[in-house]
Amino acid sequence: MRYLAAACGLALAGCGAGDAEAEPTLKGKVLAKTADVPVGGGTMNEDLKIVVTQPEAGVYKAFSSLCTHKGCVVSTPENNVITCACHGSEFAADSGKATKGPATGALAAYQVKVEGDGVVVA
Ligand code: FES
């Protein structure tokens, strides 16, 4: 259980599935370079614990990489599916919604936009 406490200790306000708003300090932060985010896949910003996805060409999304089940870090998506290796939950790479349990809550979403060659928090 120690990993869960550590994950939630990162940002108390952001601990939990319901917080879908980017924290003010992240606004304008470059999460990834667009070139590093394959269509149907994604890339992990390990410092910020955010997974950036490109569910369809030119559409970028970003979600907390902390699983809503027990807080493990999820994988980067393959074929638009984000998987948590701890207990097998799956999340949609376009919405963050849980598509397979045991997790039921969606990954917390961040609003992002493309600026230059980067995906940044809007
Ligand atoms: S912590 Fe992700 S499925 Fe259990």
Image: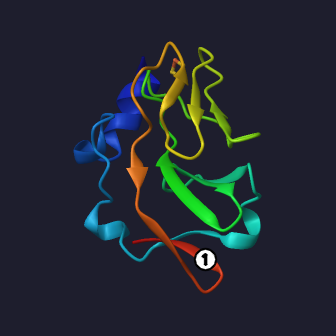
Percent of width and height locating residue 53: 63, 53
* Quadrant location, the C terminus: bottom left
Q: Quick one: 20 or 66, which is closer to the camera? A: 20
Q: Is residue 57 left or right of residue 5?
A: right
Where is 103 relative to 96, above or below?
above
Quarter location, residue 77: top right
Quadrant in the rendering for residue 81 = top right
Q: In which quarter of the image is residue 28?
A: bottom left
Side of 40 where 2 appears, left or right: left
- In x, y percent, where is residue 34? 68, 71
Q: Residue furthest left?
A: 13
> Residue 112: x and y, percent?
46, 66
Tell me which residue sits at (44%, 38%) in the image.
Answer: 107
Q: What residue lies at 58% left-to-right and 62% top-to-bottom?
A: 60
In this picture, is 114 found above or below 90? below
Q: Which colour scheme is used?
A: rainbow
Q: Which residue does the image show at 41% across and 49% down from the upper left?
A: 109
Q: Mark 1 points at which residue?
A: 118
- Per the image, label 1 sits on a secondary structure element best described as strand
Dividing the image into 4 quarters, which one contains the N terminus? Answer: top left
User: Is 56 or 73 nearer to us in this picture?
Assistant: 56
Camera-nearest residue between 31 and 34: 34
* Callout count: 1
Please say if 89 is above or below 16.
Answer: above
| Three-letter residue code for mark 1 | Gly
Q: Residue 66 at what x, y percent from top left?
A: 47, 36
Q: Is mark 1 within 8 Å of ligand 1?
A: no
Residue at 35 percent across and 28 percent down: it is: 5
Q: How crowded is mark 1: few (under 14 residues within 10 Å), some or many (20 or more)?
A: some
